[in-house]
Image (tube, rainbow, N blue to C red):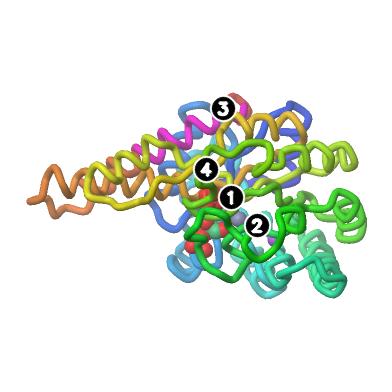
Amino acid sequence: ARITLRQLLDHAAEHGYGVPAFNINNMEQGLAIMEAAKACDAPVIIQASRGARSYANDIMLAKMIDALAEIYPQIPVCMHQDHGNNEATCLTAIRHGFTSVMMDGSLEADAKTPASYEYNVAITERVSRMAHWVGASVEGELGVLGSLESGHGEAEDGHGAEGMLSHDQLLTDPDQAVDFVARTKVDALAIACGTSHGAYKFTRKPDGDILAMRVIEEIHHKLPNTHLVMHGSSSVPQELQDVINKFGGEMPQTYGVPVEEIERGIRHGVRKVNIDTDCRMAMTGQFRRIATENPNEFDPRKFLKPAMDAMRDLCRDRFERFGTAGNA
Ligand code: G3H
Ligand code: 13P
Ligand code: NA
Ligand code: ZN
């Protein structure tokens, strides 16, 4: 059954759990998420980026979500637009059956200038008003995540946008967050706490200086009723790096967000946890393994089935660790 982000995260807040939001681009990723959810009785957030929508086609994506909801009638499904950049992206998503949209007005901002803040408030407030008219939920974002918003593509040095702005300039300001939520009436707020998108987040296991979980605690203290969202929350597990590199990959050593840090966030108001990179790595490891172990194989299903299974196991682990399991 369909569910909005607001309905799902209200339940999560009431019961103290978090919900992973996995990105989807194709049928196999959809099936992997739903199989994992079914195995541990978890509600799901499936999200599509603008890139996913142009890769898969809006009609294909919409019917795929219909199919997944029909195949797994017992699992509540929130279909969410990831990083919407304007009103058109958000409204066309809703038109295609998405029950939630992210209006990321922070995408345009490369610094905390008053003008870029006012732009973010204004466009997020407009989308929030329109989405709420038709019963959809809205996520806004305040602060600067790494690579995606630095305009530099994936960070090569593992430091995200830190090269452009000082660490504190990247992080969400708690007082500004209070003002932002009051003015935009978003259902959920994505905050910047030192993470970045992609595999190359940190060059060593992050400690309290790099990953500013205290910012989350402070925002939660000031906004106890706002659902917080962590982007860039892949853990980039060593095992997945090892599988990829064992079978011909050349990923430089890297570190993601430790799951225990996410668990700490969930104790302080984090309700939605965005994960894409880990799923990509789980699948790619299996593509590489099959290609290496069975070089004569050419049936795509022989690659996609193990890839799907690996992503399913990853998703299930996050449902269990975040406390989502058992809440469908
Ligand atoms: O936020 C970024 C997500 O990982 C989606 O990535 O834009 O390559 O589909 P994408
Ligand atoms: P990762 O790249 O860490 O998986 O983050 C995904 C994300 O934040 C999507 O919005
Ligand atoms: Na941002
Ligand atoms: Zn993101």
Which residue matches tag 3?
Answer: 321
**In whole angstroms, how far apart are the C-alphas of marks 1 and 3?**
17 Å
Q: Secondary structure at mark 4?
A: loop
Label 2 crowd bin: few (<14), some (14–19), many (20+), radius 10 Å: many
- Does label 1 or label 3 sit earlier along the sequence? 1
> Looking at the picture, which amino acid does disc 4 mark?
Gly
Callout 1: CB less than 8 Å from ligand 2:
yes
Q: Examine the structure image and report whether residue 322 is included in the region drawn in magenta.
A: yes
Q: Position of residue 297 (x, y in %)?
A: 12, 50
Q: Residue at x 32, y 39 (%)?
A: 242
Q: Residue at x 58, y 63 (%)?
A: 148
Where is 57 relative to 62, above or below? Answer: below
Amino acid type, mark 2 = Leu
Give how far apart the Cα atoms at labels 1 and 2 are. 8 Å
Residue matched to label 4: 256
**Residue pictured at 50% horizontal, 50% vertical:** 276
Read off the magenta span. 310-324
On the image, the x and y values in percent for residue 102 come to 69, 59
- Residue located beneath label 1 in the image: 232
Mark number, residue 145: 2
